[in-house]
Amino acid sequence: MTSSILEVENLHIRYGGAATDAVRGVSFTLGRERLGIVGESGSGKSTVGRGLLRLLPSAKITADKLRFEDVDLLSLSEDQMLGVRGRRMSMILQDPKFSLNPIRKVGDQVAETYLRHFKCSRQDAREKAVAMLEAVKIRDPERVCEQYPHEISGGMGQRVMIAMMLLADPDVVIADEPTSALDVTVRLQVLNILDSLVRDRGIGLIMISHDLNLVRNFCDRVLIMYAGRVVETLAARDLDKAQHPYTRGLLAAQPRIGGTRAPLAVLDRRPEWLEEVSR
Amino acid sequence: MSTRRLSMQGAIGHIGTILVTLLGLLVLTFIIGRMMPADPVRAMVGEDATRETYEQVFRSLGLDRPLWEQFFYYLGDVLTGNFGTSIRTGQPVIQDILHVMPATIELATFAILIGAGIGVPMGVIAAVNKDRWLDHVVRVLSLFGHSMPIFWTGMIALIVLYAKLDLVGGSGRMDQFYIGLVPETTGFLLIDSLLAGEMDVFWSAVNHLILPAALLGYSSSAYITRMTRSFMLDQLGQEYITTARVKGLSNRQTVWRHAFGNIRVQLVTIVALAYGSLLEGAVLIETVFAWPGFGQYLTSNLIIGDMNAVMTCVLIVGVIFIALNLLSDVLYRLFDPRTR
């Protein structure tokens, strides 16, 4: 793939004080597409996302290659990294209840992203923020700007989060379980907003999730992670044709509306998969 | 509309709580006054008064009345601003206290400014550099401040900085030479000397204030540092900090623009409490530095059993704490939109 934005080869991440790597030799490329990373809790999927943004101060990150557009992420200084975060690569966090600063107004928090990366007046940044809030389908954005995070709903909070992270027009967005804290009814709405913005702007999206159906519907390709490794990579539409027994196990453990009432399959985890190398 | 009504109810509830607390405080001081193993009548009439004199004074003080009746007399007296006369000085107690309080307020205010001014930044620095050498240095320093007996550090500091190096003033609020030069208008020497235009006295007062205030400040900074560090660590682990970093903010911007705002409420509480205990009087420092303050006044009256004075002192300490709590409640509302 020549048009790839992000190229990751043999990524290892080890938390400070840990005996083993949390991420062990993950490789993938990302183009202007939507890539899902699926796995159980503890499989290392979130660690990959945070590692790419170098947000893990105590962790040791190594890779044969960690190229983002024209830069090698590993060789950047922290100062240079500050120019990448938020501006060229950003991340949508899980739960707006915790990921928004409780004592600052929504408008200020959104505008801060713009103020941080562009030389402009507060007024200009504010206008950008309002326009972006409109783009995530918030009605009456001027009023929402003056509200505090505890005064808005979870779905609205997550749309504010999306606005904040897309405001500086990044090339890659990592969405770390963006809807798992939301009510089922607003999930789809938020995902559709994210999806259309990502498509319109040609952003590369990494969707980290444990929800197979969500990934199937909103991603082009899927990586299945198990114990810090990628065990299988497939096109989202081919998810049902997965070969790896772990992926098959994940699929089998899902309940289906109209399915039989027989007990669901229990996930099988075999030690030999731990050392297996994909591709 | 409904939120305004709610906040009105809140304000009324607040005032109600304060009144109940004040009443409780009055009951407490009254009981302390009556339970103290000191005989106020004996203290007044002297050891070799006749039985008749004793009984007469006993009755004139209303001590032959039932306890609840005595309490209502006490309540009435307090409400009309009559706190009784000091046995020792023969003056109204309140007048004596108004005379010593400014010295303590001056000392405590400077001490808390120093304590919070050092303690808060040190705590933040320690939290940001958790488990690195800077953190360890700060923690050792605050441990020293916490564990060194203040009368000892006070004396050592006086010997070194005053007697040997002559960098600061010695004991008392100003040099002997200046005493009586400035008329007592507010009781606050720094203000009075400025009002009188006596800059020499002002600088002498500053010179005398700086050492005891620094020592008290250092010792309260120890507590403030430790608390700030733990509040800060708590906030730095929150998810909104990750958000701020994802936006591209530097560590410093993340700490001061995002995390610090969220610890202000907690800081206000502990600084107000530390200030309260300083206003209560730092007896040891006041003794070492011959500082004519509230702590000394309370202690000396406690020892000779001058009950009116003691009861009033306890009452004042209680009122100070109620006032500081009220202040921190107001600041909560200012700092945290969720409480509005």
Image: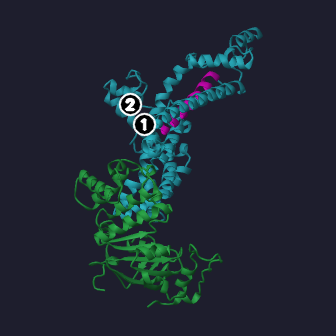
Chain colours: A green, B cyan
Judging depth in this view, the residue of A238 and B320 nearest the camera is: A238
Pick the quarter of the image with the C terminus of chain A.
bottom left
Q: Is residue A124 left or right of residue B55?
A: left
For the residues labelled 2 and 1, the Cα–Cα distance comes to: 10 Å
Residue B28 position by quadrant: top right
Query: Hey, which residue is sitting farthest front in the picture?
Result: A258
Q: Find numbered disc 1 in the image and state the secondary structure of the residue it sits on.
A: helix
The picture places residue B298, in percent across and down from the top left corner, at 58, 29
Judging depth in this view, the residue of A15 and B181 nearest the camera is: A15
State which chain disc 1 sits on: B
Q: Is residue B170 visible?
A: no
Task: Tell me the residue that label 2 is attached to.
Answer: B190
Q: Find numbered disc 2 in the image and state the secondary structure of the residue it sits on.
A: helix
The picture places residue B196, in percent across and down from the top left corner, at 33, 23
Task: Tell me the residue that label 1 is attached to.
Answer: B209
State which chain disc 2 sits on: B
User: Is tag 2's residue or tag 1's residue first in the polypeptide sequence?
Assistant: 2
Judging depth in this view, the residue of B124 and A22 nearest the camera is: A22
Q: Is residue A212 left or right of residue A269?
A: left
The picture places residue B267, in percent across and down from the top left corner, at 48, 47
Judging depth in this view, the residue of B46 and B106 nearest the camera is: B106
Q: Residues within 10 Å of mark 1 (few under 14, many from 20)?
A: many
Cβ atoms under marks 2 and 1 closer than 8 Å: yes
Q: Residues within 10 Å of mark 2 (few under 14, many from 20)?
A: many
Q: Which residues are magenta?
A: B306-329
The picture places residue A221, in percent across and down from the top left corner, at 40, 80
Q: Is residue B198 visible?
A: yes
Residue B307 highlighted magenta (yes or no): yes
For residue A271, above or below residue A128? below
Q: Residue at x 50, y 63 (%)?
A: A184
